[in-house]
Each structure stands twice: as structure tokens, then as C-alpha cells.
Image (cartoon, rainbow, N blue to C red):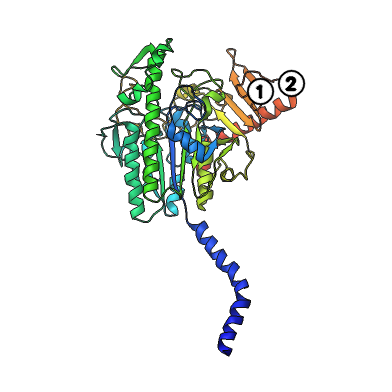
């Protein structure tokens, strides 16, 4: 009895001290378990082209369900108004002009550090599936997905349609039969299942080829939009599926095909979500979706934002943004915090306890939006379409051997008579005033400065209050000279930092 009494006394008096330690150990274990991560992106998918944003025609039931149950990022921005540069920002957390990915077809540089590099160091299996477009995907390319940190890839140099030709781990192109979004989702699922068997967390990037023109869709998806040809009769320019060259067609026919591609992409995302649930992976997987730039000119209907793909107005850079992660986002939420593709690297590193690259980043950790702790972006957002004419006229030294920059995977749309894509990147010549040119913008809080060069070569400024005027209809330039000056100074200072990086200074640390 005395022995039992001693045990009872010890437990009664020590348990209050031990319990916090036991709970702390349990919390540490929970925190240490890294989430699986899937980052998806559509090609030319603008902000308004979803059901949950109230589009009058397009059907996106899966994205709508994610929006209704997860986290809506209603002010999510692509890093650039065109695809290759945005993809660079997505991978590196840095503005693409820092490493010469100025426009579509301009590659990344081999010295850049990606999220896959960082997460691979802490045990993640990293895979890329679909559009690459920041360099050639073939073996031997110093900027293929493998060189950029991915253990496996089934990828295309650019975009693709039905029955796509893709390269597996740098091998020669092979045709994959089927609807293109479903094809790459199925390949991603194979990769995910392999990582699960190895008991490894996975980091998976899925970059769809849809809905980039030229459009190509299944009959059942097209039938959903049979009413559109009668509603939109103006002519628009795009690529011919027959010739690979330019063609003019009625917009209603074009929208019918485009929206069918979006619906097929949406369905493929549903296949992925269903598989994650069946494998017991859904709760602990962060599933993200965004677009890479605003709606393309052939499909832009002019609402609710000003501009389109290729422009620094919000219609060119504001895109759908969604996150689903049941273990962390238990209730549906919507945030208006301004978030960018450049924020993905620092945020994923923060969520996984991974170190950041030792160089200038433009993105920030926005993981606080997941639970509402972050209510305002801590730094400005910058956009800049670099004046590529300055580089091409100077004819500087190629950064990468041009032979290694030649693409291999075929596509419908021809460029220079070729049904594939080659890439370039150059060593920056000494910086001049001309390097600061090109359409550019800064968003600081609620205010946005937009700068274009006039025909006379002088800068033309506009200032918008995005909260009062999200359509950017009324410039406030001159109403508050101190605000105008502050925005201009911030933009110029940031450009100086970018051009310093462009010279390769970040690699010499």
C-alpha cells in the first residue's frame, strides 16, 4: 500500500509538469511533418474566367468547389503580363528581369535557385509536369527541369494541345494520347504515388497547356458552349490548327473552344483531387492554382479589369488564385491581400522550414494569409516589361550555348517557320538609361503607378486607387504630388536593384 501510495503521489505531483512537455513534443512532431505541395498554373487563364468570379459562360465546377471550401486569393497577381517571365518568378521568387527572362522564349539562367532546389535539400521528391517555357526540356540543357531541381519531369518546351508530344526526363518527344490536361495530371499522379511508396513528401508542379490558343477540345466539352457563336460575332486573330500560322475567325467560335479547354482543365484538377482523397493524402496536401497572366486578346471581353495579356494594367496581371489544404484551412475564407507568383518560393520555404536562397528576392512569405494573420502585403508589387529591343540591337554574348537552347517538343503554332520553340538569354552589356524603359508599374498598398513611354520617348504616368477604382478608369496623377513622387522613386530604386542583378552580381556573392 505504501508503494502504491508513493506512485500515486509521484504521478499526481509530476504529471502537471510532464504534461506540457508531452504536449510540446506532440506539437513538434506535428509541426515537423512537412505538407505535400502541388502548385498548378493555367496558361493565359485570366482572373474573370471562372464560375466563382461570376463569368457569364465558363463552367469551372471544381475550381468553384475549391473556392467555396478553401482559400480564395482574390487579389492574386502573376509576376509579369506574359508567360515565360511569370514562370521564372514562380520558380525563383525573383522578378524575371533579374535573370534575363524578359518575354516568352527567353530562358532562365543556370545559376538561378528554385523552390525545387530548396525543397529537394530537405527530402522532398520534386516533379514537373506540362509546360516549361523557361528553357529547353531536353537532356543536356543547363536549364531543363532536372537542372532546376526536379527529380522527374514530363514536360514541353512550350504549350500543347490534344495528344501532346512531351519529353520524359529529357528524352526525345513522345506522343501521349488524350486530352492534354488529363494527360499531365495522370503523369503527376504516377509521380505522387511513387513518392508515397518511398514515404517521401512530394513537391509537384503542374503547368497546364490550356487555355492558350490555338484551341482544341473534346466534343462533349464543346457542346457545353454551342450557344456562343451566335452571341459573339466580331472577328479576332489567333493561330490556325491547320497551318500553324495566323488566322481570323469569329470570336464566338473561338470562345466556344477556349471555354471547353478551361472546363477540361477544371475536370482534370478534379481527377487529381479525387485521387488525393482516395490515397489519404488530401488533408496534408497544399493544393494551389493560379493563371500565368491575364486573358489573351482573342478572348478578352473587357470586364471587370482594364487591359489584357501583355499589359501591366490589372487585366494583364491579375489572375485566379486558390489554395486548398484541409489540415490548415478548415473553413472557407477569402482574402484581398495582394499576393504574387514571386511569393511562392519564400512561402513554401517558410511552410517547410527550408532556408531561403542567399540572394535578392522580390517575393515575401505570405503564409499568414492561410489563417488570416496577414491582412496587408508588407512590401510593394512591381511589374516591368523590359525593353528587349535594347538587348537585341546590342547583340551581346549569349548566356547559354545557342545549341543547348534549341527546343525539341513540337507544337501547332509555328515561330519563324518552326513548329517548336528555341530560347535565348544574354549577358547584360553596361547599363544605360535605355535599360530602364518599357511598360512598368508598382502597387503600394491601395495605390498603383503605371508608366509607359510616349511616342516622343517621355514617360507617361498614371496613378490609380485600386480600392476605389479597381477597373483603373480614373488616373489621380497630380492630385497628391507627394504620393506620385513616392511611387516613382520606389519604382526607380527597385529597377536599379533589378539591373544590378541582371549584370550577374547576385551570382558573385
- Counting every numbered tag in the picture gives 2
The mark found on residue 286 in the picture is none
- Please provide percent x and percent y for residue 175: 25, 33
Q: Nearer the viewer, residue 309 or 376?
A: 376
Q: Is residue 461 visible?
A: yes
Q: Identify whether 135 is placed above or below 246.
A: below
Per the image, the residue denoted by label 2 is 479
Q: Is residue 238 left or right of residue 7?
A: left
The residue shown at (32%, 32%) is 180
Per the image, the residue denoted by label 1 is 463
Q: Is residue 108 visible?
A: no
* Marks 1 and 2 close (CB-CB < 8 Å): yes
For the residue labelled by badge 1, is the local secondary structure a helix, a strand or a loop? Answer: strand
Q: Nearer the viewer, residue 212 or 509?
A: 212
- Please provide percent x and percent y for residue 404: 34, 35
Tell me where residue 336 sits by quadrant.
Answer: top right
Q: Identify whether 371 is placed above or below 59.
A: below
Q: Nearer the viewer, residue 494 or 318?
A: 318
List the single residue furthest toward the top: 234
On-image quarter of the N terminus: bottom right
List the single residue furthest toward the front: 1
- Please provide percent x and percent y for residue 108: 43, 36
Of the residues under marks 1 and 2, which one precedes in the sequence?
A: 1
The residue shown at (61%, 77%) is 12
- Please provide percent x and percent y for residue 87: 45, 34
Q: CA distance from mark 1 to mark 2?
A: 9 Å
Q: Nearer the viewer, residue 298 or 137?
A: 298
Q: Identify whether 393 is placed above or below 236.
A: below
List the single residue furthest toward the bottom: 2
For the residue labelled by badge 2, is the local secondary structure a helix, a strand or a loop? Answer: loop
Q: Is residue 178 left or right of residue 44?
A: left
Amino acid at each position: 500500500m505504501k508503494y502504491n501510495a508513493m506512485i500515486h503521489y509521484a504521478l499526481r505531483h509530476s504529471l502537471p509538469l510532464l504534461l506540457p512537455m508531452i504536449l510540446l513534443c506532440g506539437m513538434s512532431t506535428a509541426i515537423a511533418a512537412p505538407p505535400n505541395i502541388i502548385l498548378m498554373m493555367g496558361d493565359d487563364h485570366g482572373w474573370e474566367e471562372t464560375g466563382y468570379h461570376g463569368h457569364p459562360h465558363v463552367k469551372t465546377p471544381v475550381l468553384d468547389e475549391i473556392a467555396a471550401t478553401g482559400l480564395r486569393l482574390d487579389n492574386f497577381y502573376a509576376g509579369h503580363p506574359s508567360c515565360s517571365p511569370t514562370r521564372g518568378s514562380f520558380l525563383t521568387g525573383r522578378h524575371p528581369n533579374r535573370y534575363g527572362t524578359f518575354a516568352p522564349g527567353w530562358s532562365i539562367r543556370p545559376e538561378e535557385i528554385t523552390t525545387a532546389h530548396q525543397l529537394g535539400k530537405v527530402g522532398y521528391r520534386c516533379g514537373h509536369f506540362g509546360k516549361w517555357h523557361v528553357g529547353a526540356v531536353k537532356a543536356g540543357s543547363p536549364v531543363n527541369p532536372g537542372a532546376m531541381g526536379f527529380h522527374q519531369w514530363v514536360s514541353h518546351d512550350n504549350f500543347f494541345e490534344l495528344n501532346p508530344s512531351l519529353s520524359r526526363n529529357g528524352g526525345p518527344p513522345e506522343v501521349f494520347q488524350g486530352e492534354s490536361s488529363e494527360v499531365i495530371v495522370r503523369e503527376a499522379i504516377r509521380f505522387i504515388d511513387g513518392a508515397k511508396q518511398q514515404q517521401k513528401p512530394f513537391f509537384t508542379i503542374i503547368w497546364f497547356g490550356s487555355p492558350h490558343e490555338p484551341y482544341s477540345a473534346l466534343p462533349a466539352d464543346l457542346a457545353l458552349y454551342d450557344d456562343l457563336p451566335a452571341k459573339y460575332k466580331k472577328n479576332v486573330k489567333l493561330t490556325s490548327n491547320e497551318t500553324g500560322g495566323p488566322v481570323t475567325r469569329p470570336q464566338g467560335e473561338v470562345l466556344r473552344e477556349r471555354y471547353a479547354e478551361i472546363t477540361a482543365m477544371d475536370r482534370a484538377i478534379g481527377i487529381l483531387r479525387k485521387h488525393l482523397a482516395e490515397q489519404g493524402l488530401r488533408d496534408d496536401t497544399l493544393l494551389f492554382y493560379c493563371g500565368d497572366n491575364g486573358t489573351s486578346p482573342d478572348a478578352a471581353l473587357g470586364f471587370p479589369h482594364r487591359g489584357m495579356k501583355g499589359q501591366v494594367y490589372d487585366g494583364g496581371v491579375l489572375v485566379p488564385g486558390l489554395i486548398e489544404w484541409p489540415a490548415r484551412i478548415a473553413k472557407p475564407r477569402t482574402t484581398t491581400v495582394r499576393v504574387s507568383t514571386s511569393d511562392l518560393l519564400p512561402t513554401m520555404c517558410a511552410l517547410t522550414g527550408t532556408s531561403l536562397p542567399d540572394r535578392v528576392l522580390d517575393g515575401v512569405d505570405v503564409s499568414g494569409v492561410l489563417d488570416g494573420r496577414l491582412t496587408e502585403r508588407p512590401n510593394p508589387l512591381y511589374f516591368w516589361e523590359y525593353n528587349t529591343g535594347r538587348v537585341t540591337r546590342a547583340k551581346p554574348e549569349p548566356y547559354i550555348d545557342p545549341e543547348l537552347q534549341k527546343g525539341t517538343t513540337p507544337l501547332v503554332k509555328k515561330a519563324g517557320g518552326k513548329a517548336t520553340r528555341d530560347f535565348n538569354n544574354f549577358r547584360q552589356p553596361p547599363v544605360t538609361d535605355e535599360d530602364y524603359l518599357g511598360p512598368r508599374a508598382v502597387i503600394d498598398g491601395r495605390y498603383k503607378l503605371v508608366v509607359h513611354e510616349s511616342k516622343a520617348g517621355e514617360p507617361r504616368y498614371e496613378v490609380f486607387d485600386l480600392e476605389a477604382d479597381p477597373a483603373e478608369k480614373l488616373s489621380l496623377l497630380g492630385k497628391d504630388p507627394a504620393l506620385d513622387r513616392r511611387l516613382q522613386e520606389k519604382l526607380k530604386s527597385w529597377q536599379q536593384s533589378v539591373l544590378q542583378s541582371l549584370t550577374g552580381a547576385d551570382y558573385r556573392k
